[in-house]
Amino acid sequence: MDFFDILTLIGGLALFLYGMEVMGDSLKKLAGGKLELILAKLTSNRFKGFFLGFLVTAIIQSSSATTVMLVGFVNSGIMTLGQTISIIMGANVGTTVTSWLLSTTGISGDNFWVQIFKPSSFTPILAAIGIIMNMTASTSKKKDIGSILLGFAVLMFGMEAMSGAMSGLKESESFRQILVMFENPVLGILTGTLLTAIIQSSSASVGILQALAITGAIPYSMAIPIILGQNIGTTITPVLSAISGNTDSKRVAVTCVYIKMIGVVVVASVFYILNATIGFGFMQENVSAFDIAVVHTLFNIISTVILIPFTHWFEVLAVKTIKGKENKEEDAIFSKLDDRFLDMPGFAVEQSNVLVCEMARITKQSIKGATALINNYDEKIAQKIMDDESLVDKYEDKISTYLVKLSAVNSTENDSKMITELLHVIGDVERMSDHSVNILEVAKEMYDKGITFSEQAQKDLKVMISAVCEIVELSTNALINNDIESAKLVEPLEQVIDRLKLKIKASHIQRLKDGDCTVEYGFILSDLLTNCERISDHCSNIAVCMIEIAHGSFETHEYLSHVKGDGENDFAERYAEYKKKYALQ
């Protein structure tokens, strides 16, 4: 193996690792957060958990990515520690799928059908299809499929390059002497652990071992302990991910370590005791890429079968190992905005949307509570509204900061639209909460000064408040349920509320002229009307934002002019209905 072979080996390894990353990232993007949602809604059934862990890992080609997801889920309170254990075991088996794909590099023979299944035959075709789809596709889904094909092709080309560069090692006496060292089980396990910990992927390290095995120089006695070590080394990724997490997320990481280490200790102990007793004749035989896939899969299946009955004890062990206090309620709320989810944009968007909807619910209740205080002031309710307004401010700050981070991540077209919508919406929701406090302050002033409006003013204000409560209900429900049809009902009602404000003010001026009202009462009434009208404006902003982004644009002024001028969406008819419903007496 000369200097140029070493260069080829380095280049092949770079292509291999890059192809694996591109393929994995594209698979996750194509899933669009669906895999994460499936895991997040998992029941506590251990066998269902095992199957889903296997399925998700087989699809995204990374047990490390799956366990990092679980760390994030537990850190956010979406899942419990107990739910993750069987999923981790399923992920351990699911990660072996990659080794089976890579084993095709060892296919040999002159038969046409044998040749066609060799990577050197079909990967150029996949690469060509992938680049065409990537360059010409009109949708992000097709581009992601193209990237998956390209990533797989690059991965296979890298595998072929590594195998070719190392082909001369079979004849090297010095290389054989080095290999003898790794036949020591302890040294072999440590080597496999270290290699996998460095590149943070057992699939990649197993692939490197398979490329080396194609040279025909690797015996079972060396391959088996290295494979066992590779399974331990893959736990470094969830451990690093959990360092900044809460107590439960650290327990998930330590559970991953326990499952792998106990599995390796049990299987290795039994295997080497049997080997010492009866002797396995195949130990000095050379392995192929296919044989490595078999050993890797058998270890994980046997380990899982042995350990899955003890999932509860792994939970107990993790709790005893990592001790800590529970999170504060507020920390638990915002832990859903976990930076780990930035690698899963679809799920991160979904989590952000959940918090925005919760923020909208809090604001809706604050507005209803504040308007009720006008005629029946209650200090406890007032304090609750003030506390909720502070909480909504925190929601706005945390969510907007997280969405800005998320907008910098390469995400799908639908996810990008959702991020844009949420960034616009949270500002309006926060301002609505501010106006609920303004209404509360007016209600407190009326209570402190003993102010009571005239009978007509009370009737007019009751109509206005009813209209405002309905528009808040419409807009928040439209947002929470992503209901575009409900959003279309908001603008006609907003126009009616604008009209109500003008008519009530005109009625007040007439009462001033007639001596039935005072200027001071007029200021207070004006404050209430202004805050009600501003709330309806923000409801309109939310609804229009939803409608425009759903149609692929964000021209709010153009939309409003269009629906009012052209009568689109039966605007005039709905306006007439609301005008009749909220007519002043």
Image: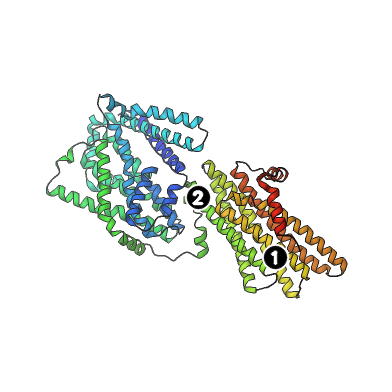
Q: How are the colours assigned in the image?
A: rainbow
Residue behind mark 1: 439
Q: Quadrant of the C terminus?
A: bottom right
- Tell me the quarter of the image containing the N terminus: top left
Left or right: where 542 falls relative to 77: right
Left or right of 35 on screen, residue 224: left
Tag 1: residue type?
Ile
In the picture provided, is 389 more to the left or to the right than 33?
Answer: right
List x then y, in percent, for residue 141.
48, 38
Q: Label 2: state its secondary structure.
A: helix
Residue 530 showing in the rendered view: yes
The residue carrying pointer 1 sits among few (fewer than 14), some (14 to 19) or many (20 or more) residues within 10 Å by Cα, namely many
Depth order, front residue of 72/572: 572
Residue at point 65% right, 74% down?
378
Residue 193 seen anywhere in this rendered image of the structure: no
- Cβ–Cβ below 8 Å for labels 1 and 2? no
Determine whether 56 is above or below 375 in the image.
Answer: above
Q: Quadrant of residue 357?
A: bottom right
Q: Earlier in the sequence, mark 1 or mark 2?
A: 2
Helix, strand or loop at mark 1: helix
Q: Residues within 10 Å of mark 2 (few under 14, many from 20)?
A: many
List x then y, in percent, for residue 263: 27, 53
- Residue 270 in the image: above or below residue 124: below
In percent of the image, x 51 and y 60: which residue is there? 333
Closer to viewer: mark 1 or mark 2: 1
Q: Which residue is mark 2?
A: 348
Residue 164 pos. (x, y %): 31, 29
Which amino acid does the dot numbered 2 rest on? Ala
Report the number of numbered marks: 2
